[in-house]
Amino acid sequence: MNDEALWTIFVNATLINNFVLAYFLGICPFLGVSGKIATGVRMGGAVTFVMLISSLCAYGIHKLLIALGAPYLELISFIVVIASAVQLVEMFIKKVSPALFRALGIFLPLITTNCAILALALFQTNKGYGLAQCLVYALGGGAGFTLALVLMAGLREKLELASVPDVARGTALALVIAGLLSMAFMGFAGLGG
Amino acid sequence: MATAAATSGGMDDFVKGIWRENPVFVQVLGMCPTLAVSNTARNALAMGLATGFVLLAANASISTIRRFVPKQVRIATYILVIASFVTAVDYLIQAISLELHQALGAFIALIVVNCIILGRAEAFASKHPVGRSVLDALGMALGFALALFCLGAVRELLGSGTLFGAAVLPARFQEWVVMILPSGGFFTLAAWLLLFAWWRQRRERRPQVAANGGAR
């Protein structure tokens, strides 16, 4: 069992070990949907929601598989749970806001292959978190992902207006910005103790 | 004639993954493991091999079962096939080298969600026979491993002055610690992409070379 304080877990997951900028998880949506702040916020919301559900399920599945003595099924069951959760979110968003559904496009079903979510399930299992710790960890991870996405989107909105050499347009420029953001986030090291 | 076309088609399936459709540098897929484990050349190469194996096995089996899988559940089926192979690789690496297993950490399990594998399954293996799918997987795997190695070598060389753990640069070389840290991964990949973009642009400006490029 792990007895980390809840707020430490949250600060750790959001700032110090930010999923995107320190662990390189979820880079694809980070580069793909960070064009506008509004889309970024909603994408972050969707990812956080899926994280919460899959974190909850992963906790239960882990307990169950340990009881059954079949830990090798862990990876397979986690990914199935995540895929189903994403399917649910997709149906929900399509019903509630068709405009958002179109804006997120291909990146919505791709949440399934967002490594941040599977990694969250694996990390919490490795660290031996309890139920409350798992949920806080998921919330922190989601908040960190949203924060990174929104910061990136803000920078890219400004860059639209800047004149950039042709060679650097697109992914290369986005990666340089991500590198600078990641350096800035290194400043948080030591905050959570 | 027919055989010649078939061979050149097979050759093309193999070669395109290495350069023209390189998964990392051209398609910009599978970024997460690419950036995360490329802090040393050894880790990068190991990750490339592990991913390559899963890619090969997954492409071959998905291509075999492509006629039996209903269209609606195909993605779920692919993910399950991939996850099984990844579990096998995870245990295999643990058995071969515990040290390597710890260095790569959760990223071995995360091969499941590497977009390259699912992408190739959906875009190629589900539509082509086994032989061509295997060739495609081999090419893509080689391209991915090569890209990882390019990143890992640069980061290790500048970040700790070594290559595969052996000292290469003179002892008075001041290490660029930032290259091993996360931000170094972003910068190195950006530099490679810039280099390729610049090279492509230069080639397009020279007409006779561009004509050759167009004929390919």
Image: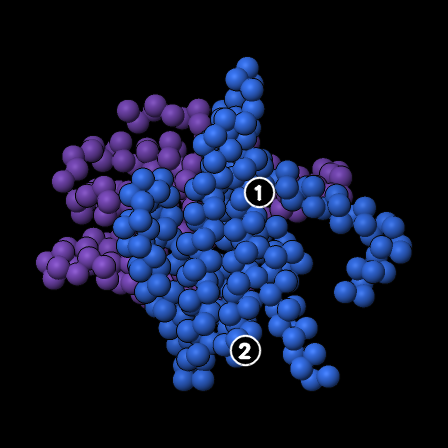
**Nearest the camera: A47 or A64?**
A64
Residue to which mark 1 is pinned:
B150
Please tell me which residue is depicted at 14% across the width and 56% down the height of the picture: A66
Please tell me which residue is depicted at 75% across the width and 45% down the height of the picture: B199
Q: The residue under label 1 is which amino acid type? A: Cys
Identify the element where label 2 is drawn.
loop
Q: Quadrant of residue A61?
A: bottom left
Q: The residue under label 2 is which amino acid type? A: His
Neighbor class of circle 2 (other Cα within 10 Å; few <14, some 14-19, many 20+) is some
Q: In the drawing, does residue B203 fall left or right of residue B105?
A: right
Residue sticking out furthest to the right = B207
Neighbor class of circle 1 (other Cα within 10 Å; few <14, some 14-19, many 20+) is some
- Quadrant where the N terminus of chain B sits is bottom right
Residue to which mark 2 is pinned:
B128
Q: In the drawing, does residue A96 fall left or right of residue A132?
A: right
Identify the element where label 1 is drawn.
helix
Between disc 2 and disc 1, whose residue precedes?
A: 2
> Is B193 rendered above or below residue B170?
below
**Nearest the camera: B137 or A182?**
B137
Check the rendered structure and report the hue given to chain B: blue
**Nearest the camera: B173 or B73?**
B173
Q: Is mark 2 in CB contact (under 8 Å) with mark 1? A: no
> Is B173 rendered above or below residue A121?
above
The disc placed on residue B66 is: none
Query: Chain for mark 2?
Result: B
> Which lettered chain is shown in purple?
A
Residue A31 coordinates in the image, percent (x, y): 55, 48
Please tell me which residue is depicted at 41% across the width and 84% down the height of the picture: B68
Residue B142 coordinates in the image, percent (x, y): 54, 56
Residue A92 coordinates in the image, percent (x, y): 39, 65
